[in-house]
Image (cartoon, grey):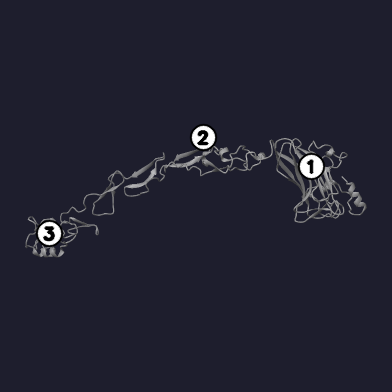
Amino acid sequence: MFRPQWMALLLLGAVTVSAGQNRGDRGAPRENRPRDENDATLVGEPADPLVDLVWEPVSDWAYVGQVFEVQLIARTDTAEDQTIAAIDVALHWDADDLKLLGIANDGPYGWLSSGFPDDSAQDGLNNTFLDGDAFYEAWSSFSDFAVASPQGLHVTTFLFEALQETESAQISIEESVGLFTESHVFGGDFFGQDVTGRFGVVSLRVCSGAPGDDDGDGVENCFDLCSGTPLGESVNVDGCGCSQLNCDDGQHCNGVENCAEGVCREVEPPTCDDGNECTADSCDAAANDGAGACANEPEPAGTPCGDPSNTDCDNRDSCDGNGTCLDNYEPQGTPCVDEFFCNGEEACDDAGICQTGMDACTDPWLPFCDENIDECVECLKIGDVDGDDDVNLQDFAAFAGAEGCQTGPGGPVDPPMYAPECRCLDADDDGDIDLVDFGYFQRSFSE
């Protein structure tokens, strides 16, 4: 579509437009737009930056019947500025949800013209605003072009009325509508040069009811999913406090949920530990019709469990394959060995314990057991008749009593003249117990 305004500038020699130029060429996507000298559609086509057209709503919600503003912003897609000669915008919106009322203001730049031109001779989008389509155009002053920056140029502000409740009422900029209407940004440095970038879409929620925060929880009514929050209770972004939420998700395996400041949180999942080493504990999320439940399956037979001891009488306990830990005792009577010599030969009992046997020293002439050398000996000490490792009055009684061990001189003789229990009094080992032995006894006496 050739603009009449261009003709005036062409007559002044301000710009040269190639004879084959058409709006379809200028409206190609940026990555497909010709850049080499053979395919260039405009004389002196510049490089970046391009200009994006985006929306900035004053608010991201509105109420039914409320009039709200949406700003059109022209923003370069690099860090550089770009001059603008003209902007064409093919608007589209949800006509059931929104109604276009017109323009509120044109931003800080004084456009030569800004508005909805009579396009009845082309696609007639501006004949009515009830169908959700319109065509907007803005022209810069020829002596002072508008400039888009990376921060954005406020082009104009559109007024819309919210018609019905919806989660997402959209306003978009279309590449083309109808046969002739297209969206473009034309540069000023090379007048008429297409510097069109990307087009934005904005959506906002339309709510029923009245603006405000009726329950005073800090969340606008439009977004408050839980009305009537108790005063002072902390809420989430949806305006719901813990007293208004059911945090139980019905899933056993992710733990019991709790709530803090309106946010449901999962605590530690269940361990499902039944305290039985012979079962494998887990949580089956598919059990109980998908609600989940603990599962305690038997471990394979032979799995170690229980008492880890591994002795002569008690082997390592193991599972039976049915969830029971079995004692692996050796049969009763199985020989075993403890750390002591003097308690005789040991054997296992029926509880896996190594029990001591009879006295290891049964020879009356070798009655005493020396644990230090693991042997049976005649005496632990000369003069110690009773084997208590001490020479005292009890031993003297055995020496001098009425039925004592004293035999008088007569040795050396073999066999000895005394009974086996008197052997520890024969200090000189001559077969008798006489005054010589008594002298040894006296010297050994300890109390």
Alpha-carbon span between mark 3 and mark 2 = 85 Å
Name the residue located 45 percent from the left edge and 39 percent from the top edge: 297
Tag nearer the camera, 2 or 1: 1
Q: Assess whether mark 2 and mark 3 are in contact (beta carbons under 8 angstroms).
A: no
Q: Relative to 78, say whether 235 is above or below.
A: above
- The one of 405 and 61 positioned closer to us in this rendering: 61
On the rendered structure, is 413 left or right of 327? left
Location of residue 61 in the rendering, given as x and y in whole percent from the top left corner: 70, 41
Tell me the element at label 3.
Answer: helix
Alpha-carbon span between mark 2 and mark 1 = 54 Å
- The one of 161 and 78 positioned closer to us in this rendering: 161
Tell me the element at label 2.
Answer: loop
Q: Relative to 139, say whether 99 is above or below.
A: above
Give the label on residue 288, or none. Answer: 2
Give the label on residue 91, or none. Answer: 1
Tell me the element at label 1.
Answer: strand
Q: Relative to 193, say whether 431 is above or below.
A: below
Q: Name the residue under label 3.
A: 396
Q: Earlier in the sequence, mark 3 or mark 2?
A: 2
Location of residue 102 in the rendering, given as x and y in whole percent from the top left corner: 80, 41
The reply to whether residue 428 is in sight is no
- Say which amino acid is labelled 2: Asn
Assign the N terminus to one quadrant of the image.
top right
